[in-house]
Amino acid sequence: AQRKQAEAVGAYLEELRKAANVRISLPEPPVEKVEVAATGPSRGAADAPVTIVAFSDFQCPFCARANATIDEVMKAYEGKVRFVFRDFPLPSHKQAPKAAEAAHCAEEQGKFWEMHDRLFANQRNLGVEDLKAHAAALQLDQAKFDECLDSGRMAEKVAANMKAGEEAGVKGTPAFFVNGVPLAGALPFDDFKKVIDRELGIGVAAAD
């Protein structure tokens, strides 16, 4: 509700600026950045000038919504943005930790992103047996996947991601860090565009 109210106020102020033909010539204040390790499954060029680190939860509906926005960002900034996924299962989402483990078990077989997309598309089906059925649908080696999931050996990796998120100040999901610039919530494409364009501009200035 607070986010919607802020968006409405922002839109109203923008309309006022346009109607009054206001031009702001002052430089934007410096943005406080948070140091977050870009470790984990990633998409995009390894040498991309902009890296987005996401802390996400497979049972979170807002994370599923944001997933579509990230796809849009990756297409619009092909070659310029790298996206890194890190786990942050919320305490209220009881199936999220095991779903996160399942994604890493799929990662062992080279299909993290396929499992990632499938879990977000099937948030009502994240029980252990459902996770094994998803693995079967993705044609993973079932015995290896089941052993990985049942053993719980990926729980340590999920916990490490959660700790990193907490240290970075993450309180809820989805949470993004665009070259360290924090963005919280299922934000629209334009919010990402503003930060990415600024980061790309800074990169060009530095190169000059």
Image (cartoon, grey):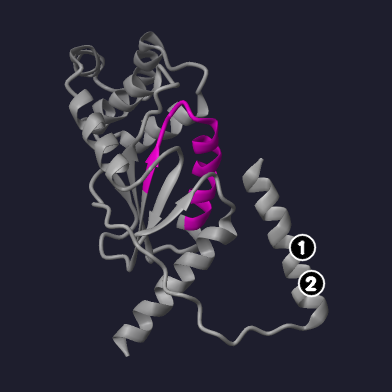
Magenta residues?
54-73
Residue in front for this viewpoint, 8 or 39: 8
Classify residue 34 by image quadrant: bottom left
The answer for how far apart the CA atoms under marks 1 and 2 are is: 6 Å
Q: In terms of secondary structure, what is the magenta stretch mainly? A: helix
Q: Which residue is mark 1?
A: 12
Residue in the picture at 68% in, 47% down:
4
Q: Amino acid at mark 2?
A: Leu
Residue 206 drawn at (x, y percent): 31, 84
Residue 199 drawn above or below residue 205? above
**Callout 1: SS:** helix
Q: Locate residue 13 relative to residue 103 in the image: left or right.
A: right
Quarter of the C terminus within the rendering: bottom left
Q: Which residue is mark 2?
A: 16
Residue 74's disc is none
* Labels 1 & 2 near each other (Cβ < 8 A): yes
Classify residue 51 by image quadrant: bottom left
Q: Locate residue 48 relative to residue 26 in the image: left or right.
A: left
In the image, farthest residue toward the top: 129
Residue 55 on the magenta segment: yes
Residue in front for this viewpoint, 102 or 18: 18
Residue 57 on the magenta segment: yes
Few, some or many residues within 10 Å of mark 2 (<14, 14–19, 20+): few
Residue 26 drawn at (x, y percent): 55, 85
In the image, farthest residue toward the bottom: 208
